[in-house]
Amino acid sequence: MKGVVFNLFEQFVVENWGEEIYEQILDETTLETTEPFVGPGTYPDGDFLALVVKATEKLNVTVPDAVRAFGKFCFPKLADVFPNFVNMHTHPKAFLKTIDSVIHVEVRKLFKDAQTPSFRYEDPSPEQLVLIYESPRKFYEFVEGLLDGVSDYFKTPIQHSRTICTENGQEFARFELTFGELEPTHS
Amino acid sequence: MTSNIADRKLARAQKQVVILEQMIEDKTRELFLSQEDLRSANEHFESVIRSMQDMLIVLKPDGMIQSVNEQTTSLLGYDRDDALIGQSINILLNEDTCFKELARQGGNTDTPFSQQETVFKNNTGDTFPVLLSGAPLRDRNGTSCGLVLLALDIRERKVLEQQLLQAQKMESIGQLAAGIAHEINTPIQFIGDNSRFLQEAFSELQPVLDNAATLVTTTNNGRVTANTLQAVTDAVEAADLSYLVEEIPKAVEQVLEGVERVATIVHAMKEFSHPGVEGKTLVNINSIIESTVTVSRNEWKYVATLETDFASALPPVSCFSSAISQVVLNLIVNAAHAIAEVIESQNDQMGMIRIGTCANNGWIEIRISDTGSGIPETIRNKIFDPFFTTKQVGKGTGQGLALAHSVIVEKHEGIIDVESEPGQGTTFIIRLPIQQTQHSASLTKKS
């Protein structure tokens, strides 16, 4: 997993529960990585899961809730770091359809070892989109959190439901999205 | 605790700086190596293109030349490749080349094509034949964004083809020579006989003429005697003048007829054996067939009657006349051989060869039918293959129909087809496009 996710997780904990809690989580978690996490680095998935599990124990929240909240937290941060991928779109549907063909392609250009999930799409109607997510990490709640983050960012409600499917022994998640009207801006 | 946290964060940040510096260094090295690889790959690619002996031309969608290799510049007589870059592909093509039309429409096609014969024009306006292949150039999304052309200079091959065709023609003439000699010998014989008769007739007439001259002189002198008149009468009787007056014109007529027959055969021979001009010329197909029928007469006259049914208002066809006559000869000889086989095996009577021409829906059609043994269904798809023959060793090389296919389909953009009923006979149908004749086409397609 890329170091940027670890750095965002640190920000997420620090902003919500303070620096001391994060340092405690770091101290109490057994990590394979001995050096500090840096954005472009690649680290074991297990280290991230260990940090999340320790955080949920310490903060008394469930792992799915924590991961979902983390996903929602991440999206605006990532959008700030890579505005070009987001700002060219006015509607979340158009943006979401570029994840596999543009964003992940660019990620793999920068980081040859990056293991990006795969996204396939079905487009049943203008107000709907089906996202088919497949990754050995199975970060379904993280995707849900990101979708909430996308909704907030574009100020457009997104209702989503998730179905876990299996095909040829491969598990994947089918997210059925329905987009609402653009929320009016308040002056 | 707060200062402790600050210290820990500072220590982590310092380590992060070191790690990031190392990463930047690694990435810079990686980038340098990638650029080196890219440069090396590019040099390799350019070297491959430089060493190509074919002309490589890349077109933009609007038909403008985007890039060419050195061979293109050199063969077309330009000093630098930038003399061609940015120009329309039309400067290399003739007015009537189909591809030029394509270029005019945008120079773009989604359908690759291969080995089409056309001509290229060099910087002095001289043309030379090329074999042209093309494929659409596609961007990363698969959208066509130009055309890659590969052209092979086939000047040398064309000369060899011409020489080969002429060699085959000479071989045919060699095979036909005995028959032609026989065809010429018959009229020569009766020309000789009649000439000898005329010689004798003249010597028999000589006394009549001499005595007639004496009679004229003595009459003028007023000294005509009975002896003089008797001498004339005797000479007329001795010469059998009434017989000579009747027979001499017949002999002259037969001599002239014989001379005409010989002249026809010689003319046909000359027309058939003519090496032909380099390109296509407008010719009368009926006349080509007629000459070929004449020179091949001895091949078929013992086994078949040959009937022709030529359309009188056939438009002239632009073709390689020498090649077409060779094809017709091959088909006539094949027809005669097929009929001869039937006669030999079934002790049958003379067969029939029919040759007809007509203009039909934009095509000139030639049909050559025989009453031979026919072609079995099982081998019908092989008859145009080179070296395929069912004739006895020494009688057929398996080149006749292969050559016919090559000449009609590849050289003339035409069609050659066969209809056959075993035991009934075979009809070869040749179709030459009239459209091509109007444009004196220089682009031929492989079908």
Image (tube, coloured by chain):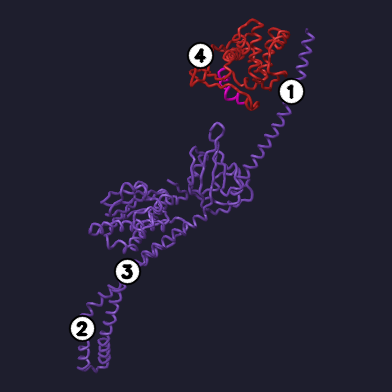
Q: Write down the chain letter for disc 3.
A: B
| Residue B125 coordinates in the image, percent (x, y) | 55, 53
Q: Depth-wise, is mark 3 or mark 2 nearer the camera?
A: 3
**Quarter of the figure with the C terminus of chain B:** top left
Residue plotted at (56% across, 22% down): A118
Q: Which mark is residue B19?
A: 1
Task: Find out whether residue A95 is within the magenta segment.
Answer: yes
> Viewed as shown, does residue B22 lie left or right of B238?
right
Does dot 2 land on a helix, a strand or a loop? loop
Foreground residue among B355 and A132:
A132
User: Do the residues at pointers 3 and 2 share their chain?
Assistant: yes
Q: What range of the chain is rendered magenta?
A: A92-105
**Mark 1 to mark 4 CA distance (whole Å):** 41 Å
Estimate the x, y position of residue B181 in percent, counting from the top left. Answer: 34, 69
Disc 3 marks which amino acid? Answer: His
Asked if marks 1 and 4 touch (Cβ < 8 Å), the reply is no
Which one is in front in this view, the residue at disc 4 or the one at disc 3?
4
* Residue behind mark 2: B240
Q: Which of marks 3 and 1 is in front?
A: 1
Callouts 1 and 4 in the same chain:
no
Residue B182: numbered disc: 3
Q: Which amino acid does label 1 sit on?
A: Ile
Q: Mark 4 points at which residue?
A: A163
Chain name for mark 4: A
Alpha-carbon distance for marks 3 and 1?
A: 103 Å
Asked whether disc 4 touches disc 2, contact meaning CB atoms under 8 Å apart, the reply is: no
Q: Nearer the viewer, residue B283 or B232?
A: B283
Q: Name chain A's colour.
A: red
On the image, which quarter does residue B229 sit in? bottom left
Nearer to us: label 1 or label 2:
1
